[in-house]
Amino acid sequence: MAQINLLQAVNRALDTAMEADERVICLGEDIGKFGGVFRATSDLQEKYGKARCFNTPITEQGIVGFSIGLAAQGSIAVAEIQFADYIFPAFDQIVNEAAKFRYRSGDQFNCGGLTIRAPYGGGISGGLYHSQSPEAYFCHTPGLKVVIPSTAYQAKGLLLAAIRDPDPVIFFEPKAIYRAEVGEVPDTDYVLPLGVAEVATQGSDITLVGWGAQMHQLHRASNMALRDGISCEVIDLCTLLPWDVDTVAQSVEKTGRLIISHEAPRTGGFAGEISATIQERCFLSLESPIMRVTGMDTPFPLVFEKEYMPDYLKVYEAIKASVNF
Amino acid sequence: MAKFDRTLGTLRFTEATDLSIPTLSILDPQGELRKGAEAPVIDKETALKIYRDMTYIRVLDERMVSAQRQGRLSFYMTCTGEEAAVVGSIAGFSDRDMIMAQYREQAALRYRGFTSEQFMNQMLSNDLDLGKGRQMPVHYGSRALNYMTISSTLATQIPQAAGYAYGQKLSGNDACTVCYFGEGAASEGDFHAGLNMAAVLNCPVVFVVRNNGYAISTPNSEQFSGDGIAPRGVGYGIKTIRVDGNDILAVYAAGVAARKLAIDSSAPVMIETMSYRLGAHSTSDDPTNYRNAEEEQLWAEKDPILRMRKWLLGKGWWSDQQEHQLKTSYKKEILDALKSQEKRPAPSLDGLISDVYQTPPLHLQRQYAELKQHIDKYPDHYLANPARVDSAYQYASVQIP
C-alpha cells in the first residue's frame, strides 16, 4: 500500500474507474491536459484520450446538463465543478433535473451514472467565492446523494462507490486538506459503502459528529479534552444524504451528549437536521442540550477567516460546556 | 417572430463562415498609421493620460507579482498584454458611466483615478480598504469612481449590466454601463441571458469582450468553435465591432463610437478586443504547463504599450527621457504605497457581521457576542496578526487558481 494524499486518492479513484469501465467519462473546466486547477485529473487525458477526459467551456449549467444527458444515455459521467462556490449556475440542472430524473419518468429514465465532484471549504484565504460549504442546499433535495470524505482512504473508496452508485451523487472534496491529509491507500479497486458513518475514535463521555476537513478540528479538540479526562467518541459522517442515523443514535445513547460541527453557516446548516433527528430518537438518553459549533451566519470572510472558522478551540470549549452543563 | 422576408427556393445551410467579422486595425506594429486607416480624433492630453495609465498598470502588475512572491500578498492577477484593450476602451466613456468588470481590468479603475494607496488597501485587506477586507486581492470596487465591486463568480455581471443600463436610461442621466468580461465568461449562461435582455430591452450598455486566447489553461479552440464572440452579438441583434486589442487607436475609436451609439440609440453595443493574456491567469498559475514560449514571444512582440509608445514618439508627444522618468516615478510611488499601507491595521472585527444586512439582526449580534467571549479566552490565538496573509494558518500548498 502506498502513502498518498487525499488529492492523489481522488486521482487514483478516477483512474481506477476509467480503467475498469470504458463508459466512465470525466469532464470539466481545465481538467484535460492541464489536469484541473488542483490536479485531480492529472494524466487522465493522456491515458484515456480526449474523448473520455476533456475540457469543457466555462458553463457549469452546461457541464451538469451535459452530464445528465450522458448518464441518461448510458455513460458514467464524472463532472468536475472547479469550486463548490461555482456550482450555483448548475443548481437548476441538479435540483430540478438530476434529482428528479428517475422519479418523474416512473423509472423509465435515470441519470444514476452522474457524479459531480467539487472542492469545497475554507482554510485557504479564499474569501467569499473560494471557501463555501454548500452541502446543506443539496441535502435538502430528495433524489441526490451527498458524500464528503475526510481521509485519502475514504476519498478513493467513496468516490469509486459514488461513481458506481445507481443514483446521482454530489461528491464534495475538502480542498484545504487535499495535500495535508496523507494515509495508506490500497492500489486495488475497492469501494466504501455510501450512507455509512465511520466511528473514527471510540469514546464514552460525548459524541462529536462532523465530516470533511472539519474532522481535523474534531480530532484535535478530542485530544485536548482527553487531557482533561473527557473521552470523546468522534464520528465521521462520510455521507450526508442519506446519513447514518443509527450509528450516531447508538453513540449518543451511550454518551448522552452530542456536538455537531461544520464550517457552513449555522442557520439551515446540516447540523440542525442531525440535532433534530437525534433529539427525536435519543431524548431520554440526553444529559445536555445538543450543541452546534459552526460557521457564523455571514458570507465567508477573508481577513477574519480565522475568527469565523469553527476551529478546535471552539469545539473544545463546547465539549467542556456540554460536559459541565 | 422571426423575420421571414427573405425566401430561397434552394436548400442551403448558413455556415459560421458566412458571417465574417473584420478586425479594425489602425496602427501597424511599428506604431504607424496603416494606409487608408481612419485615425480617431485624439488630443495630446488624452493620449498621454492613456499612455501613462497603461504604463502605470504594467509597473503595478510587475511589482505586485514580486510582492506576492515575497509573501506580502496572498494572490494577484495581471492585466499584462491587455492594457490597450482596457484603457483604450474606457477612455471613450464618461466618468458618469458605470463600469462592471470581470477582475482583470484594474487599468480602467486607474483611468478613473484610483490611487496607489487605494490599490494597496484592497490588496492588503487593511482598515482603509473600501471593501472592508472581505475579498481576495484585485476584487476592487469604488462607488465614487463608478466601478462596481468585482465578484469572483464569472459572467454574473453581464445581465446585471443590462439591468443597470436600463435603470440609467429610465433615470435619464445621460450615462451608460461598460461591461467587461473574457471570452471564457462568454460560455456562461449569464452571457446569453444578459445579451438577449440588453438587446430586447434596448439597454445602453457596451459589452467589451476581452478575447485573450486563454481561460486559465483552456485555449480558445476548446472554448468555442465559431468565429470568436462577435458573431454572437450580431445574433442577438447587437451592433458589434471587432478590434485589434493591442492597437490603442483602434480600441479608442471603437470605445468612443460605442458610447455614442449606446447613448444616442439607447441600445447595447459589443466590442470584441483581440489580444493575448501575456501573463499567467493568476499568481497560482504556471502557463508553461499548457502553452509554449514561442507563442508567448510572438505576442510579446505585439506589446500594446510599446506600439503606442512608438506612435507617441513619432508624433513628437513623448521622449525616451520622459519614459525613463515616468517608470522610475511609478516604481517609487507603488513601492512607497506598498510599504506604508502594509503597516496599517486590519479592519475592525465587527466587520464580520456588518453589511450582511443593512442592520445586523439579533441572531448575528448574539453570534458576534459569543465570538468575542471566545476570543477573550484565547487572545493569543486570534487577531495575532491582523493584517494577515497568515501562511501558518493556510494549509500548505493549496492555492486559489
Image (cartoon, coloured by chain):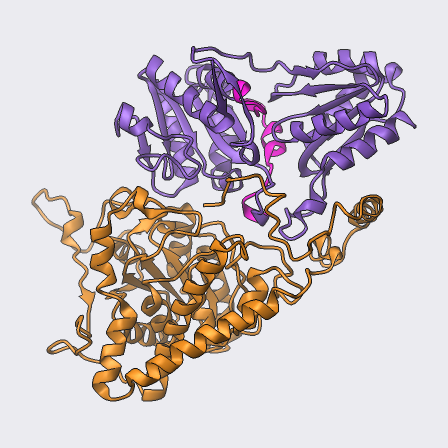
Chain colours: A purple, B orange
Residue B243 in the figure: left or right of residue A40: left
Residue A55 in the figure: left or right of residue B331: left
From the viewer's perspective, is residue B395 above or below residue B133? above
Residue ID at (48%, 23%): A4
When asked about the image quadrant of residue A132, the answer is top right
Q: In the rendered structure, which segment of residues is drawn in magenta? A: A128-154
Given residues A206 and B59, the one toward you in this image is B59
Residue ID at (29%, 63%): B273
* Viewer can see residue B142: no
Q: Is residue B59 magenta?
A: no
The percent position of residue B177, horizontal first and vertical second, equals 45, 68
The percent position of residue A187, horizontal first and vertical second, equals 43, 13
Tell me the quarter of the image containing the C terminus of chain B: top left
Outermost residue on the left side: it is B10
From the viewer's perspective, is residue A242 above or below residue A27? above
The percent position of residue B10, horizontal first and vertical second, equals 7, 44
